[in-house]
Amino acid sequence: MNRRTFFQTTALGTAGFAVSATLPNHVFAETPKGVTTDNFEPNGRWTAERARAWGVAQPWIVGCNYVPTYAVNQLEMWQRETFNAKIIDAELALAAKTGMNTVRVFMHHLLWREQRDVFIANVRTFLDLCEKHSLRVIWTFFTNGGKEPSVLGPQPAPKPFTHNSEWRQTPGKTEIMHKPENWHQMEDYVTDMMTEFRNDPRVLVWDLFNEPFNSGDRWHTLGFLRLLWTWARKVNPAAPLTSAVQRIEYTPIASFLLENSDIVSFHSYESKEVIEERLKIMREYRRPIICKEWLARGRKCTVFDILPLFKKYGVGAINWGLIPGKLQTHYPWGWNESKGEPKVWHHDLYHEDHTPYDPKEIELFLKLTQENNQR
């Protein structure tokens, strides 16, 4: 299958979908003999069989977390005043040229609440551009990371030499997350966006909450997650639901995510050895796996070590980022002006003139994704 063919295939994951599919042994752990609960998921979660069938139908998922160079945060990416399809088109073309077939992007509830029709129109334009470049989208609704408050209009300039200095929380701790009486305000947003694009084959995955454990008040977050999953299950979209674990540990949030996500996803900016050990544990869930954030060169999480590892295990690989732009994520965490320009970039693959940070990294992307393009 070539990189355009999957847009012409009937969307998988609709109600009642069931396909018997066997993946190579290196992708999923061997199914244990005897009693199985594969077809028993009382909360509406996809069965393991359905999830594996979805995984078989995909090419190797490889891509990047994408924020346009003009945007300092999610608001500047999408809002009426600053959305720039021309820049997005050129940058998505660069992602496709790298061999990628997927981009992960972030939304914000304020865009829907105050500019609903414009926001949805911009999302449609973005999806059209993704289709033009044979890319599919992982949509991310919420995140505990970033600053408050969120206000539409002109956004602050990035702080010099600082990693992702003006990202915005959504829905935000002050307004929503720490006030359970306000949680219901997000139901219409989630339901409307998911219903609008429920069967759109360009939507690869619904990523309901980015790093929900990354919060000083995890009790509130866990309660919100339970409602969030209930809203999403009512829509019953064609694409699977997920939210990433960062560590394999039995916290209430990690347990909830692993027990309710249709496909397993995780984030890791650690070494090959650490990631491989985690993969061995996650394979026991016998579901497709995507790493939705990786690449931290100074922490031994490099393209050369990690991308071949994900290829070996059949794990989706979505690195952070494409071009630093206003996000400045080529600076390491905790960087400041006194340190000057880093000798080794933290994230990202290209300079703003679209020349590679390291041409050998791009060669490896192309080498490992070549099989996708010939299917």
Image (cartoon, rainbow, N blue to C red):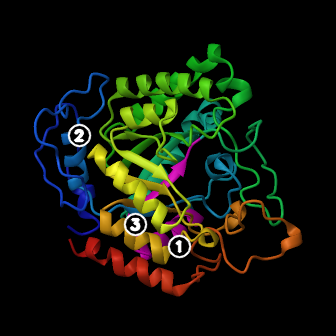
- Look at the numbered disc 1 and give the secondary structure of its residue: loop
x, y (%) of residue 42? 27, 22
Residue 31 versus residue 10: which sits nearer the camera? 31
Residue 202 seen in the figure? no
Quarter in which the N terminus is drawn: bottom left
Residue density around tag 3, few if under 14, some if 14–19, many if 20 or more, within 10 Å: many
Nearest-to-viewer mark from 2 and 3: 2
Residues shaded magenta: 86-107
Residue beneath disc 1: 302
> Residue 289's spot in the image, x, y percent?
35, 52
Mark 2 or mark 3, which has the lower sequence index? 2
Q: Which residue is mark 3?
A: 133
Q: Secondary structure at mark 3?
A: loop
Which badge, 1 or 3, comes first in the chain's sequence?
3
In which quadrant of the rendered view does residue 16 lie? top left
Amino acid type indicated by mark 1: Thr
Residue lying furthest right in this view?
338
Amino acid type for the residue under numbered disc 3? His
Q: Label 2 to label 1, Cα distance in Å?
A: 31 Å
- Residue 173: percent from left, percent from top: 70, 30
Q: Position of residue 270 (x, y in %)?
A: 55, 62
Of 350 and 56, the residue lying toward us? 56
As drawn, the label of residue 48 is: 2
Q: Residue at x 76, y 44 (%)?
A: 153
